[in-house]
């Protein structure tokens, strides 16, 4: 089974792909769709890039965080729009969709639903398949710096879903 984890946003969409085979997790690809140009074209760019990724890797399962309370309503609306495009793209291609709240993912990884980012990072690094460690070792810096939170979210989502399937 190929599993696609998505961390949606309007200006960047983080993703990670793994394959679960005979109880083993195999890294396939991870990265970020960077949206260029006007925000008015962002949703179309997300859809096209995601459609291409799905066509290339043919995942059977999409893992995505549920939208939770946000302090900035404008940002929350933009993330909701991006999530909608991601879910639509997956549904059009017949992927199963699993949505979990951030605290459910934290619970699955650390055993505590309100763990902080450092605790999640520690457990992800200790997991038998640490996508984050791979990314830190092998990927170029994104915009000059690693967006640790974004990659951590992707890694956490994929590790969590892979363990639950």
Image (cartoon, rainbow, N blue to C red):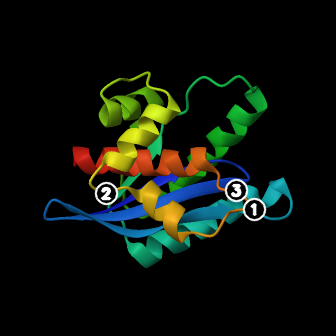
Q: Is residue 84 above or below residue 33?
A: above
- Whether residue 26 is visible, yes or no, is yes
Earlier in the chain: of badge 2 and badge 3, it is 3
The residue singled out by tag 2 in the image is: 129
What secondary structure is marked by label 2?
Answer: loop
Asked where in the image residue 75 lies, by quadrant, the reply is: top right
Q: Residue at x 61, y 69 (%)?
A: 49
Do callouts 2 and 1 mark residues in contact (Cβ within 8 Å)? no
Q: Position of residue 45 (x, y in %)?
A: 70, 65
The residue singled out by tag 1 in the image is: 144
Q: Which mark is residue 43?
A: 3
Callout in the foreground (2, 3)? 2
Q: Position of residue 136 (x, y in %)?
A: 53, 61
- Whether residue 91 is visible, yes or no, is no
What secondary structure is marked by label 3?
Answer: helix
Label 2, residues with CA under 10 Å away: few <14, some 14-19, many ≥20: some
Do callouts 2 and 3 mark residues in contact (Cβ within 8 Å)? no
Residue furthest toward the bottom? Answer: 56
Q: Position of residue 6 (x, y in %)?
A: 50, 52
Callout in the foreground (3, 1)? 1
- Residue 115 horizontal side relative to residue 76, left or right: left
Q: Residue at x 43, y 27 (%)?
A: 103
Asked where in the image residue 35 lies, by quadrant, the reply is: bottom right
Asked where in the image residue 23 lies, by quadrant, the reply is: bottom left
Alpha-carbon distance for marks 3 and 1?
Answer: 25 Å
Q: Which mark is residue 29?
A: none
Nearest the eye: 144 or 64: 144
Nearest the eye: 81 or 76: 76
What secondary structure is marked by label 1?
Answer: loop
């Amino acid at each position: 089974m190929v599993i696609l984890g998505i961390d949606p946003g309007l200006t960047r969409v983080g993703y990670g792909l793994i394959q679960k085979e005979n109880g083993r997790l195999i890294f396939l690809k991870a990265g970020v769709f960077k949206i260029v140009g006007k925000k008015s074209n962002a949703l179309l760019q997300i859809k096209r890039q995601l459609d291409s990724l799905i066509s290339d890797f043919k995942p059977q399962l999409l893992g995505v965080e549920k939208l939770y309370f946000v302090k900035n309503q404008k940002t929350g609306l933009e993330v909701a729009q991006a999530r909608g495009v991601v879910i639509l793209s997956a549904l059009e291609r017949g992927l199963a969709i699993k949505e979990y709240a951030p605290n459910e993912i934290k619970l699955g990884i650390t055993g505590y639903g309100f763990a902080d980012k450092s605790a999640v990072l520690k457990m992800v690094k200790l997991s038998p398949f640490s996508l984050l460690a791979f990314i830190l070792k092998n990927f170029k810096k994104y915009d000059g710096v690693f967006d640790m939170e974004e990659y951590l979210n992707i890694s956490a989502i994929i590790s969590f879903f892979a363990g639950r399937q």
